Image: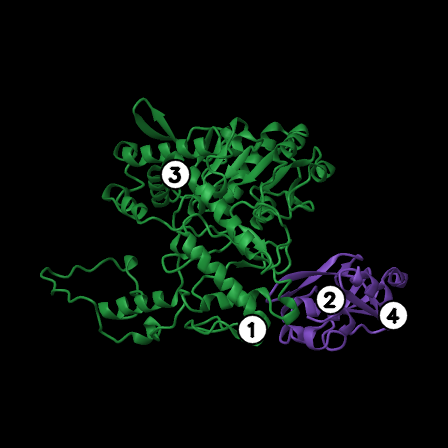
Chain colours: A purple, B green
Amino acid sequence: MKEISDLNLPDDMKYTKDHEWARLSGDIVTVGINDYAQDQLGEVVFVELPETGDTLSKGDEFGSVESVKAVSEIYIPVSGEIMEINEDLEDAPELVNESCYEKGWLIKVKPEDVSELDNLMDKAEYLDMLKG
Amino acid sequence: MDNQPGASGLIFNEPSLWEKSRKGRCAISLPKADVERAELDKDLTGDAPELPQLSELDVVRHYTRLSQWNFGVDSGMYPLGSCTMKYNPKTNEVQAALKGFAGAHPFSGDEFSQGSLKLMYNLEQYLAKITGFDTLTLQPAAGAHGELTGMLMIHAYFAKKGKQRSKIIIPDTAHGTNPASAALCGYIPVNIKSGEKGILDPETVAAVMDEDTAGIMVTNPNTLGLFESNISKIADIIHSKGGLVYGDGANMNAIMGIVKPGEIGIDVLHLNLHKTFSTPHGGGGPGSGPVAVGKALEPFLPVPRVVKDLDSYKLVSDYPDTIGKIHTFYGHFGIMVRAYAYILSMGAKGLLDSSRLAVLSANYIKESLKGTLNLPYDMPCMHECVFNDEFQSKNNVTTVDMAKRLLDYGFHPPTIYFPLVVHGAFMIEPTETESKEDIDQFIDAVKAIAREAEEDPEKLRKAPFLTKVTRLDEVTAARKPCLRG
């Protein structure tokens, strides 16, 4: 498992306490699980995602990520409508391990209120939380 | 690995029965029919089932070879925490095979089933005495089914009172099936954390208990192998708000003859005959999960119930508040015979000694391996102790690597990654049936593996080596499962 100093945590996104990431691009927020989460889970074997068109509130469970070790629920970082899900994960769940910020993204959300992102952590705050 | 039970020997490959099948091959030669063939009505007939065609020797070798690939408690120590893989004395099997029991038919009626009914009645009495309850049902098929039965009775209790409740409290050291059983009855599980010492704090329970909560499900001893010593205080808190206490008695094997759950505030408790009372387990099952209740829940017990009437026994279903039947006929009767044989052959003192020895064995292992493996909760344990891989993780050796390697030494791995409250848990339950010599060998094996973790971690990551099948590729198996033979 990675040391905290080895984690890849890009600056251009926000982080949740449950180790999801959220990146705003235009008026769409892309969501995934971060490097720490994929490393802790180990090899991901199945990803369960919501339907496009579902509307969820910040903090709602929107699916789960399953590895050989455990099943983890995943929680949506902003309220809004699911515009797109990453259908590639159905056949290639390993993308979550190999490319958690690019090819292994989970959902794209049209947020109701973009300012909800302000309540999430930036990289420095997230690292502080991990170090406890 | 000198003097360890694990060794390599000749293991046979064995194809599936379908691959061995040859058209027309058969175990016996049937004589030609000497009566005229009588055609059955077309509606009553169909195609014959498709079965492999084999000689007797084909079949005997097939299962003998498969059994040699296997690991059972008859071949070696099986310290699977939380599962209580104690040895099942062979006399239990002899008694269950007695013609009168093995040949009993569920439709024989009370008159022709007096022996079987007497056994069920007496077993109920013994289990009630051991647990400190008034009465119980033998019907549930296993532990989780017992939980469901108990929760259905709690649900019926509140329905009868006229005001159903919506929640149930479940600690993080309860068995994983507890929240599922409660949810099936419509209750929302409210999870609470155990305290720093691995047991429940009464204040944590008091903070969430209210008059919309049906009660609490407590596994005691809990899944950390610790006795919930605040149980009476917790029961008082639950009862003061009109709730009930469900006891998961799967770990009763640690406290037989020492603690009676019915006397410390528990209202309903299930037992696992296939753990505590030495009946077969896992693939060798089926199991049996009797549920004991106090006065408050007695009207809701499943039917039929065995009733003694002077010197005879009968099955009675006339209980208006019963939750009904929860199993076909009367439960797993053959398992009841085995548990009955165990109780009678052990006697009261034997059962007490078995609990004492189970606790002594677990504490001996805990003290012997402390320092070799990390012990997150360092305190006297009951029937099992929980370590983790914190010391080995610096060499990238994990719990699963050490567990797999134990197979090479001739031991079944302990339970791993459970309970969830311990990261990388390595949960050992030796039971009372292992001798000190066998336990010492096990301790030596774990110490040797811990040395290997320092000296040759790469080797551990590939273990086991001596088994028929070596390290499985669990990732590919999960990502690309092959679901057909």
Give the distance between the C-alpha atoms of the residues marked 2 and 3, in whole angstroms: 62 Å
Of pointers 1 and 3, the one earlier in the residue sequence: 3
Image-based side of B201 in relation to B110, left or right:
right
**Above or below: residue B260 compared with residue B196:** above
Q: Amino acid at mark 4?
A: Asp
Chain under label 3? B
Amino acid at the residue labelled 1: Arg
Indicate which disc residue B261 carries.
none
The reply to whether discs 1 and 3 touch (Cβ–Cβ < 8 Å) is no
The answer to whether tags 3 and 4 share a subunit is no
Is B73 placed left or right of B57 in the picture? right
- Label for residue A52? 2
Q: Which mark is residue B350?
A: 3
Quadrant for residue A69, please give it.
Answer: bottom right
Which quarter of the image is occupied by the C terminus of chain B? bottom left
The chain to which mark 4 is attached is: A
Residue mark closest to the camera, 4 vs 1? 1
The chain that hosts pointer 1 is B
Residue B180 showing in the rendered view: yes
State the image quarter where residue B153 is shown: top right
Determine the residue positioned at 32% across, 46% down: B92
> Residue tagged by mark 4?
A27
How many angstroms separate mark 3 from mark 4 (CA)? 72 Å
Name the residue that disc number 1 marks: B461
As drawn, B410 above or below B228 = below
- What is the chain letter for disc 2? A
